[in-house]
Image: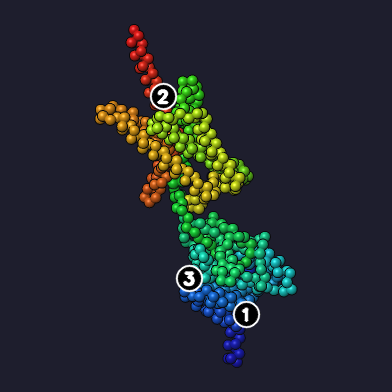
Amino acid sequence: MGTGFCLFLFACAAFMDQIPGAEPSGKATRLPLDLGAKSDVEKAMRIFERHLKEGCVSERKELMRAKENLEKTLLQTSLLTENLTVVHDNIQTLIFRINLSDFRGLNISSDSLMRNTSAKNQTRHAMHFPAELAKKAQGTAAKEMRLTCIYLKTSCFFQDRKNHSLLNDDILGATFGNISITQLSQPVEIRFWHNHTLANASVACVFWLEGTEEGSMGSWSQEGCTTNINWEGMVLCQCNHLTYFAVLVQISPTTLDESLLAPLTYITNIGCSISAFACLLTIFFYILSRKIQHDSTTKIHMNLLGALFLLNVSFLGSSFPASASLSWPCTATAAFLHYSLLCCLTWMAIEGFHLYLLVIRVYNSYIMRYLLKLCSVGWGFPGLAVVIIFLSNSQIYGRYGIKTSSAHRNSTMCWITSPTVHYFNLIYCSGTIVFNMAVLTLVVWRLRQLRASPRQWKEHSCKDMVTVLGLTCLLGATWASVFFSFGVLSVPQIFLFTVLNSLQGLFICLWYCTLRSHSQDNISTTGSRLSRSSQ
């Protein structure tokens, strides 16, 4: 009697034992525990975990053999219950018996698993399997399939030759019987929770692609997976196949602090608007008084102001097409902005070349059709460069994301998306600045020679200072501040660069007006002297 009663209680307890973590169609189930199947899985997991705990020292072949043994055990072990979950510190396995006729999808969450186990190393994760999985198995004669899931926490097992880092070292794998599941129209969703700041990192959902050749390590691939980081503390991966998934983390260049984006945007917009107006106003007044100004120097100044006007206007309008549904307006805006930037840099280099001929070389500096040739270079070369870049790959121009410390506050504009073209811009800008700084140094040295005596230096120091400051703006010396964006100078440099270069057109306009007023005063003084001498 007593023995029968005890057996009855044991059977009831086994029947009511809950298998945590499985939530078909969003509802938890209470199912009996298959002790025989659990014993087989436990044995295979202990072997695999022993190799994982050895870390990178463990032989890769032994690790692969242990993984394959665990996968084979999960697929072939005798399972009397609907599902089975076994949790260790670094491994978690789940088996589900799926009835193909009434499968409506499956949600798996680690929340209940960690609540009912003593595992300490695991981080939150979840998976959603669509109902389409059952349709993929309709070609088989089986009425029931086995869905197996494996959670791993390891940094050395799936390691490619590039030694990529994984978010939390978490890996989630899933198989559906012996069927290869690919090209799902309803993606498998994998959620990885974390407590890291991903502002300075590039995050991508990836899957493990086994090497096809003997001895090949394999690699991580993004094909068929999309990444969504719109939620703080969680990365959502959506993939159209089943395999081992992870989140690849690559350290990116330092992003912009979220609190700096708004003030820098206001300063840039205001500065560019003022500069564009100043450039247009100066060109307008020059056109009205062009009969007085026949020299090439003034015409070169006007071309530079024209390039700056195009750069400021195109930059101000670069953010609006980025939000449009069509891609071609953003592509055209980005290409025109790039053209304006190259024109601006080219005309600054032409200013330096012209200044070299005037002040340093002086003699034998006559060039036939000088201004026409300069205009061909100043406006033609940037156009040729942009056309070549566009024809080589039209996708180079498009939506460009400005990343901040908060992924929710990123900004978008129409600009260049290719790192190679960015390097080309940097080299071109650096060459222009270095050449112009060398010319400016020679000009200052020549001014010192002309003012040989201390008396002459004091008399003309103010005028020479204005001349040097004006030449600094003309030659783009303010652009050199971009090379000091490191360490404690980073934030001050960003603001200094933004203020100086957004107002470059205004500075040139003021300098030009100052020179015009001085020249008018000199003409008036000379005229009065001549009139007095004639009397």
From the image, tell me which residue sits under label 2. 516
Estimate the x, y position of residue 455 in percent, counting from the top left: 25, 27
Q: Nearer the viewer, mark 2 or mark 3?
A: 2
Q: Name the foreground residue: 399 vs 347.
A: 347
Residue 462 picture quarter: top left
Mark 1 touches mark 3? (CB < 8 Å): no
Residue 109 picture quarter: bottom right
Relative to residue 363, is residue 246 drawn left or right?
right
Relative to residue 473, is residue 179 drawn left or right?
right
Quadrant position of the N terminus in the picture: bottom right
Q: Residue at x 56, y 38 (%)?
A: 383
Query: Around disc 2, counting alpha carbons within 10 Å, would you say few (fewer than 14), some (14 to 19), or many (20 or more)?
Result: few
Q: Residue at x 48, y 70 (%)?
A: 121
Mark 1 and mark 2: Cα distance apart in space: 93 Å
Relative to residue 425, is residue 101 drawn left or right?
right
Q: Secondary structure at mark 3?
A: loop
Residue type of the residue flagged with mark 2: Arg
Q: Name the foreground residue: 451 vs 202.
A: 451
Q: How is the image coloured?
A: rainbow
* N-terminal-most mark, 1 or 3: 1
Res 526 visible:
yes
Q: Secondary structure at mark 1?
A: loop
Up/down of 250 relative to 217, above or below: above
Q: Residue at x 43, y 35 (%)?
A: 352
Up/down of 398 relative to 508, above or below: below
Res 123 visible:
no
Mark 1 and mark 3: Cα distance apart in space: 27 Å
From the image, tell me which residue sits under label 1. 77
Estimate the x, y position of residue 282 in percent, counting from the top left: 47, 27
From the image, tell me which residue sits under label 3. 121
